[in-house]
Image (spheres, rainbow, N blue to C red):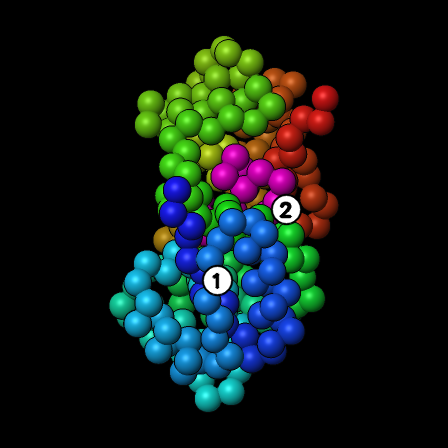
């Protein structure tokens, strides 16, 4: 299978090397750029870049400008890196079409897990029409879920919510991120709707519902059964 190509853009060579080394270990090809202008040159020259890891603060052209430029031509997944944990920055990123927003310092392993989750979601990694985790089995094409081999009935949104958890298993997800990805940006509602749907989903999943862990003050995470 051909290795997916990831563009890593950061003006700090040490940061690029850290991310590159972890991605190469995980089976990806990595191209590096040290500023925004170089990133755009590489993006338009190289073919089939699967995902971009893009720093916000850079010389010549910052990450926001690069993101705007790329988004006018392409829907390639973009993960923004920033040293600022600022809600306005995060909102700006999502409005520009950023797929994920990671604050420095971060765990390279978690960054790789987020990259893999995005590539699964955009069907560039292994095409997971059937996903399974600890006795939970989902067939997306048939719109069917089984728990330990027994079918369960889920509403459309419950199905989408469980699919998002399965695609991001092992990753802590904020309510806002779940809302943006499952309900999309056209939903002007309250993040508490997530809690209501998670409660119903857990109930329908029986004992397996306990695998959806609450991250207090943040959101939820689907954990694989360690037994």
The disc placed on residue 207 is: none
Disc nearest the viewer among 1 and 2: 1
Task: Give the percent coordinates (x, y) of residue 133.
Answer: 56, 27
**Mark 1 vs 2, N-terminal side:** 1
The answer to whether residue 107 shows anywhere in this view is yes
Please, which residue is most extreme toward the top here? 150
> What residue is shown with label 2?
172
Crowd band around label 1 with a 10 angstrom C-alpha radius: few (<14), some (14–19), many (20+) = some
Q: Is residue 12 above or below residue 105?
A: below
Please, which residue is most extreme toward the bottom here? 60
- Check if mark 1's residue and mark 2's residue have beta carbons within 8 Å: no
Residue at x 41%, y 80% (from the top left corner): 38
Query: 3 or 209, which is in the foreground?
Result: 3
Figure quadrant of the N terminus: top left
Query: 25 or 179, which is in the foreground?
Result: 25
Label 1 to label 2, Cα distance in Å?
26 Å
Task: Give the percent coordinates (x, y) of residue 183.
Answer: 42, 45
Task: Give the percent coordinates (x, y) of residue 174.
Answer: 60, 50
Please tell me whether mark 2 sits on a helix, a strand or a loop: loop
Range covered by the magenta-colored residues: 165-183
Q: Is residue 217 above or below residue 42?
A: above
Main structural element of the magenta stretch: helix, strand or loop?
helix
Residue at x 30%, y 72% (from the top left corner): 45
Figure quadrant of the C terminus: top right
Please tell me whether mark 1 sits on a helix, a strand or a loop: strand
The disc placed on residue 30 is: 1
Q: Is residue 119 above or below residue 101?
A: above
Task: Give the percent coordinates (x, y) of residue 209.
Answer: 62, 25
Residue at x 70%, y 50% (from the top left corner): 217
């Amino acid at each position: 299978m051909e290795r997916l190509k990831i563009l890593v853009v950061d003006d700090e060579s040490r940061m690029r090397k850290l991310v590159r080394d972890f991605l190469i270990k995980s089976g990806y090809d990595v191209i590096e750029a040290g500023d925004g202008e170089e990133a755009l040159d590489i993006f338009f020259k190289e073919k089939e870049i699967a995902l971009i890891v893009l720093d916000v603060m850079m010389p010549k052209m910052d990450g926001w400008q690069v993101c705007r430029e790329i988004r006018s031509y392409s829907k390639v997944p973009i993960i923004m890196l920033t040293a600022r944990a600022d809600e306005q920055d995060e909102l700006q990123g999502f409005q520009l079409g950023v797929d994920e927003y990671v604050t420095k310092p971060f765990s390279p392993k978690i960054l790789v897990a987020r990259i893999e989750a995005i590539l699964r979601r955009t069907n560039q990694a292994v095409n997971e029409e059937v996903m399974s985790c600890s006795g939970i089995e989902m067939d997306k094409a048939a719109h069917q879920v089984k728990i330990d081999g027994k079918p369960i009935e889920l509403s459309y949104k419950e199905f989408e919510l469980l699919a998002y958890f399965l695609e991001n298993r092992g990753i802590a997800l904020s309510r806002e991120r779940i809302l943006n990805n499952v309900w999309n940006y056209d939903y002007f509602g309250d993040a508490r709707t997530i809690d209501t749907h998670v409660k119903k989903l857990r109930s329908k999943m029986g004992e397996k519902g306990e695998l959806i862990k609450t991250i207090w003050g943040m959101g939820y995470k689907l954990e694989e059964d360690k037994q």
